[in-house]
Amino acid sequence: GQSLEQPSEVTAVEGAIVQINCTYQTSGFYGLSWYQQHDGGAPTFLSYNGLDGLEETGRFSSFLSRSDSYGYLLLQELQMKDSASYFCAVRDNYGQNFVFGPGTRLSVLP
Amino acid sequence: GAVVSQHPSWVICKSGTSVKIECRSLDFQATTMFWYRQFPKQSLMLMATSNEGSKATYEQGVEKDKFLINHASLTLSTLTVTSAHPEDSSFYICSPEGAGDRLGNEQFFGPGTRLTVL
């Protein structure tokens, strides 16, 4: 089986830091990715972790611990435009396709 | 990144009609195409995977006779929703992948097609 878990909703204020966690159980693992999706739009790629540790890309960072089957997305200096849904995703089935988590809806308040 | 287009971006149709959605990869050859469906406030659910020139592989619970996928060229794949019903109303998103992209880090998506069946 394969499943990913994320919190359903997170609320924070502008300028704050927020962490979105993701735990996974998959039959195969080829890295953890993160995607952002604004209402009405398609997902866009944010970050990828193939090995344990922290990856930093501007205001966004992502962390992976393969031994714990756990990762997180860290968003710093939150802006209103960061209000969106965030999905973690794992390559599964021997790399055939991505499996997406249920998504976390982030609301950034002024 | 890859440039992917989908047409139409939105469509409203009557129950019982068929709707064709086109997905084009504009700047690379898509040897594989993933088709996803997303209901409001839910995640992306993979419907089927197609390889150019081959029959699509459908996920469990997805009717292959209802959702017809054609991937006859490396730049175009189509999804036809046959005899659409209100429960088929959803956001349909394609995602192409090129040869050699397997195990790549990033997945590219089309802008999506919003289907509303009355």
Image: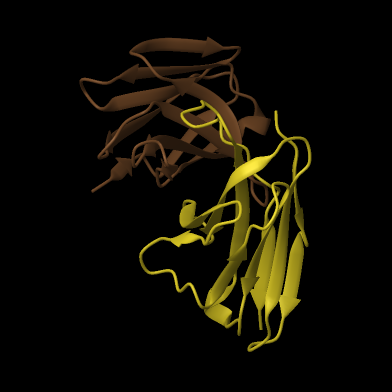
| Residue A21 in view here | yes
Please, is residue A29 above or below residue A2 in the view?
A: above
Please, is residue A18 above or below residue A58 in the view?
A: below
Pick the front one: B90 or A95: A95
Q: Position of residue B96 (x, y in %)?
A: 62, 44
Query: Where on the picture, by quarter, is residue A103?
Result: top left
Please, is residue A7 above or below residue B10 in the view?
A: above
Colouring scheme, one of rainbow, by chain, secondary structure, one colour: by chain
Give left or right: position of B110 versus B90: right
Give left or right: position of B9 versus B47: right
Query: Where on the picture, by quarter, is residue B27?
Result: top right
Image mark count = 0
Please, is residue B29 above or below residue B17 in the view?
A: above
Pick the front one: B116 or B102: B102
Chain letter, colour brown in render: A
Pick the front one: B80 or A74: B80
Hue of chain B? yellow
- Quadrant in which the C terminus of chain A appears: top right
Q: Position of residue A20 (x, y in %)?
A: 41, 29
Q: Residue at x 40, y 19 (%)?
A: A50
Q: Residue at x 34, y 24 (%)?
A: A71
| Residue A18 in view here | no
Q: Residue at x 47, y 38 (%)?
A: A87
Q: Residue at x 34, y 42 (%)?
A: A93
Query: Where on the picture, by quarter, is residue A10?
Result: top left
Q: Position of residue A33 (x, y in %)?
A: 46, 29
Residue lying farthest front? B53
Q: Position of residue B70 (x, y in %)?
A: 63, 63
